[in-house]
Image (spheres, rainbow, N blue to C red):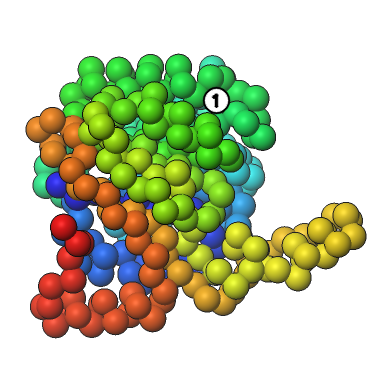
């Protein structure tokens, strides 16, 4: 089976590109299951009920998040009622929402999804390494063999350590948060697909999705500045993972870095019945 993960969706430009291109990507790559990191989907910080609903209608099976999950306060009124929207599992006991879920792929396979968050340069919440193992066991007890993990963390060292920690225990461990796609995708020795960061889906003519003038002003003056999403050079970053649904082991990993124009051309190929699938 094939799993598509779309890296941090930023603001309206990122959402619009996902809406326009998700069906094309699913058809082109033979995707059975879609996970989207949506913690920056609402104006670059947070998520609303309407945006979560739209992304799920657009074809996402599960939405993951990270340190910005609480930025729009209205999330507190609906996250408990939407099992397909995850917050990091290692938030302390009492935090609303859930850190893992199981959803059914288009080929009938139940897929477990876990969201965890690093602690280096982020909030000092519970240990993600221990929390991940607890969630894995919970999902396995519920019958999931294929398990996908979004590790939202700042440093490469923490992400790489988690990859080795979970090798052979999950199908894939994909990093998010930095908004910069890395070039180290591989299948680890025990069968876990790994990538340090999936990158960002949204405007790339700014600074990690934000308008560059405000960001530069803050760096130059040290004064507070209101950040708004940039608007140009919109690109989709993500990863396609091949998995053996009987063993839960990854069989392949391929990164995606596509401009809006490239996705438009892909849609024409797909509509014309031409093969555009993943490389072997």
Q: Position of residue 74 (x, y in %)?
A: 59, 44
- The secondary element bearing badge 1 is classed as loop
Count neighbours of disc 1 (C-alpha within 10 A) and say few if under 14, some if 14 to 19, many if 20 or more.
many
Count of numbered marks: 1
Task: Give the side of residue 65 with respect to residue 70, left or right.
Answer: left
Q: Position of residue 114 (x, y in %)?
A: 38, 32
Q: Which residue has dot 1 on it?
A: 91
Task: Give the side of residue 195 with respect to residue 159, left or right.
Answer: left
At x 33% / y 69%, what residue is drawn?
21
**Nearest the eye: 8 or 103:** 8
Task: Give the side of residue 251 with respect to residue 237, left or right.
Answer: left
Q: Is residue 20 above or below residue 191?
A: below
Q: Is residue 178 above or below residue 263?
A: above
**Which image quarter is the C terminus in?**
bottom left
**Nearest the eye: 266 or 68:** 266
At x 52% / y 76%, what residue is drawn?
233
At x 60% / y 23%, what residue is drawn?
125
Q: Position of residue 186 (x, y in %)?
A: 31, 44
At x 26% / y 77%, what residue is drawn?
266
């Amino acid at each position: 089976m094939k799993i598509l993960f779309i890296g941090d969706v930023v603001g309206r430009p990122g959402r619009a590109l996902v809406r326009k291109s998700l069906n094309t990507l699913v058809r082109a790559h033979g995707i059975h299951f879609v996970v989207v990191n949506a913690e920056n989907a609402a104006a670059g910080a947070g998520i609303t009920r309407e945006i979560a609903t739209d992304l799920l209608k657009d074809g996402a099976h599960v939405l993951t998040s990270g340190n910005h999950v609480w930025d729009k306060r209205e999330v507190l009124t609906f996250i408990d009622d939407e099992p397909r929207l995850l917050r990091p599992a290692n938030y302390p006991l009492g935090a609303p929402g859930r850190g893992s879920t199981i959803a059914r792929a288009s080929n009938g396979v139940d897929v477990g999804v876990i969201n965890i968050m690093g602690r280096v340069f982020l909030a000092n919440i519970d240990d993600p390494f221990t929390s991940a193992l607890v969630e894995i066991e919970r999902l396995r007890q519920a019958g999931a063999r294929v398990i996908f993990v979004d590790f939202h963390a700042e440093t490469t060292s923490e992400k790489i350590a988690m990859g080795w920690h979970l090798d052979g225990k999950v199908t894939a461990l994909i990093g998010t948060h930095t908004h910069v796609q890395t070039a180290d995708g591989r299948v680890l020795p025990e069968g876990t697909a790994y990538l340090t960061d999936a990158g960002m889906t949204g405007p790339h003519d700014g600074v990690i999705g934000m308008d560059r003038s405000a960001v530069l002003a803050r760096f130059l003056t040290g004064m507070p500045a209101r950040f708004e999403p940039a608007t140009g050079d919109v690109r989709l970053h993500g990863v396609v993972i091949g998995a053996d649904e009987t063993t839960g082991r990854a069989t392949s990993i391929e990164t995606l870095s596509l401009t809006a124009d490239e996705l438009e051309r892909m849609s024409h190929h797909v509509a014309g019945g031409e093969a555009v699938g993943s490389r072997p």
